[in-house]
Amino acid sequence: MDPKSLQFVAAPILQFIPAGKNELYREWKVDRNYELKLYLFGILPLGRHTIRLVNIDRSENKIESKETGLLAQEWNHTIQFQEIEENRVHYSDTIEIKAGLLTPMIWSFAHLFYRHRQRRWSKLLKQ
């Protein structure tokens, strides 16, 4: 629920910087646009990226977002997790990507990036 966790799990591959006066609050809020500047490896600008959370369901441990950016017109993301036993969690990301002719390239990047994210989540949770 903390936007800082996005920064941690995305690093060092992607970096999200608030655009303009937009701030990342202490906790994600539903139906609020988070306007961000997106960078690859903190150097290469990838344009603006907007994250809008459409659902945070604590009883189902599910977060859903509708996202858009320069490279992907749609990036719909669902995060879901459930405890399977003490100190073990099943975590999944489901992403719908619409990026026109770039979709295969963006999908390939997303596949590798989300593997990285899952390793980073594991590291964050062990801390």
Image: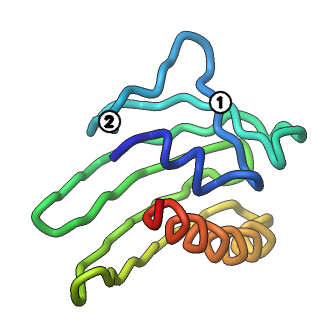
Position of residue 86 in the picture relative to residue 33 (left or right): left
- Crowd class of label 1 (few under 14; some 14 to 19; many from 20; radius 10 Å): some
Query: What's under tag 2, amino acid-wise?
Result: Glu
Q: Is residue 27 above or below residue 119?
A: above
Residue drawn at x 55%, y 55% as measured from the top left: 74
Residue drawn at x 58%, y 57% as measured from the top left: 9
Q: Marks 1/2: CA distance?
A: 16 Å
Q: Nearer the viewer, residue 127 or 48?
A: 127
Q: Position of residue 48 (x, y in %)?
A: 68, 34
Q: Quadrant of residue 26?
A: top left
Q: Quadrant of residue 123?
A: bottom right
Residue under circle 2? 27
Q: Earlier in the sequence, mark 1 or mark 2?
A: 1
Q: Position of residue 108 (x, y in %)?
A: 75, 76
Residue under circle 1? 17
Query: What's under tag 1, amino acid-wise?
Result: Ile
Task: Residue at the far left: name it.
Answer: 59
Residue drawn at x 54%, y 10% as measured from the top left: 21
Q: Nearer the viewer, residue 69 or 41?
A: 41
Task: Residue at the far bottom: name it.
Answer: 85
Q: Is residue 21 above or below residue 75?
A: above
Q: Is residue 21 above or below residue 14?
A: above
